[in-house]
Amino acid sequence: MLPVLIFCTVLTALASLLPLSNNQHWIIRGMDFPRLQIAIIAAVLLIVDIVFLDSQSVITWSLIMVTGVCFIWQLWWILPYTVLWSKEVKTASGHDPERQLSILTSNVLAPNHNAEALIKLVKKYQPDVLVTLESDQWWQDKLSVLEADMPYSIKCPLDNLYGMHVFSRLPLEEPEISYLVEEDVPSMHAYLVLRTGDKVRMHFVHPAPPSPTENEKSDKRDAELVIVARSAAESDQPIIVTGDLNDVAWSATTRLFRKISGLLDPRVGRGMYNTFNAKYFFLRWPLDHLFHSGHFTLLSIKRLPSIGSDHFPLFTRLRFSPVSTQDQDGLNLDAGERKWSKEVTKEQSLDKDDVPKPGE
């Protein structure tokens, strides 16, 4: 048993240490994702070490120390996404329908042809805005039935898993499709007009992930997130950024995005809302996101039932309440992170001015 425990402890330690590097290789960045799973493994190893090994042995205490540190380290990253943490976004105190904004974000998985399941969710939850990712021409044709109730849209059907559509009940002004980093990976930007007449700057994103089948490094994904964050940081407008970031909520790069942009994460203090992988319950993490400026409070956030995709849809209801929410604070950016963000964008020759700024 001891050799097996030593081997498992070494692997757990490596998985915990690798993300400390800013190296952008997909193997290293991939270790950001399963922090919950690594924490569970470390906890199991810790229990086994204590119960079954010789308590007088130096090796035993070495294993306990290593697994204990790994467990605490992983908890540090994931605890903000539990009810044990204080909420970053206030719970809305009023239910004025005129001030509400609901958004349903769904990575449909292009080969999945269960459009009826998504249409049923839209009819049930009545979102103001529907965002679909990986949606191709087939999905566009099937979702056209929604246009009677959601007459405003931005459409970019693609067959490369990066198609994107936005359907809205509310007017979309200055809609624009951009290819910020890669020529075949779009993002969408628009000015959404609320029922009150107030306007919200919207950014819909789906950067390519670091993976053995796509980009070997996370440099392009990271650069897109950084320039969108910088663009948001310079504006006093109400802003929402949503989509599949191909990055988990607790990763260093997503935290960097939050720190630069100043946008808030409504999941903090409430839960993980793991949207991927819908097919394997033991390999799930929060991959689909919605971040917003301090102009909003949260009515509700919910992971919806599967539509046959490898992602669950995410449904978020916000209340526009700019006067009462100025004391909502996000994360602070330090000098080291500022330098890191400059390196990320310099590699790709990108600037915040590359991001469309509807309403400005």
Image (cartoon, rainbow, N blue to C red):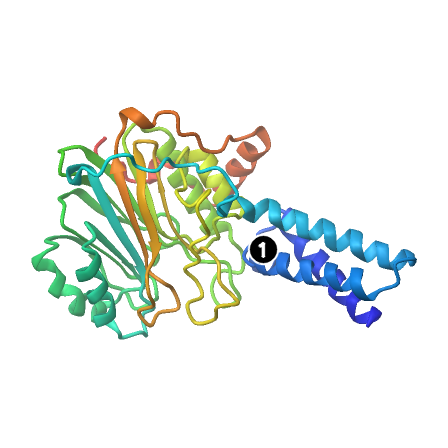
Residue underneath mark 1: 35
- Please tell me in which quadrant of the rendered image residue 13 appears: bottom right
Q: In which quarter of the image is the N terminus?
A: bottom right
> What's the residue at 92%, 57% (across, down)?
56
Disc tally is: 1
Q: Which residue lies furthest to the front in this view?
A: 51
284 left or right of 11 in image:
left
Q: Eyeballing the image, is 34 above or below 190?
A: below
Q: Which residue lies furthest to the left in this view?
A: 148
* Displayed quadrant of residue 133: bottom left
Against 228, residue 249 (above or below) is below
Disc 1, SS: helix
Residue at left 56%, top 38%? 340
Left or right: residue 202 versus residue 146 is: right
The relative height of residue 247 versus residue 240 in the rendered view (above or below) is: below
Q: Which is nearer the eye, 23 or 268? A: 268
31 lies left or right of 14: left
Residue 27 appears in the rendering = yes
Q: In which quarter of the image is residue 185?
A: bottom left
User: If the image is split into quadrants, where does the C terminus sit?
Assistant: top left
Q: In this view, does 75 lie to the left or right of 299?
A: right
Give the vertical position of 110 relative to 294 (above or below).
below
Question: In the rendering, at what x and y percent does residue 104 appear?
Answer: 27, 54
Look at label 1 and name its amino acid: Arg
Q: What residue is rendered at 70% in x and 52% in y? A: 70
Examine the rendering and report whether any part of residue 346 can be seen: no
Residue 112 rendering spot, x and y as whole percentages: 31, 74
Q: Position of residue 299 (x, y in %)?
A: 29, 43
- In the rendered image, residue 284, in percent from the top left (x then y), is placed at 49, 62
Local crowd size for mark 1, using a 10 Å CA cut-off: few (<14), some (14–19), many (≥20): many
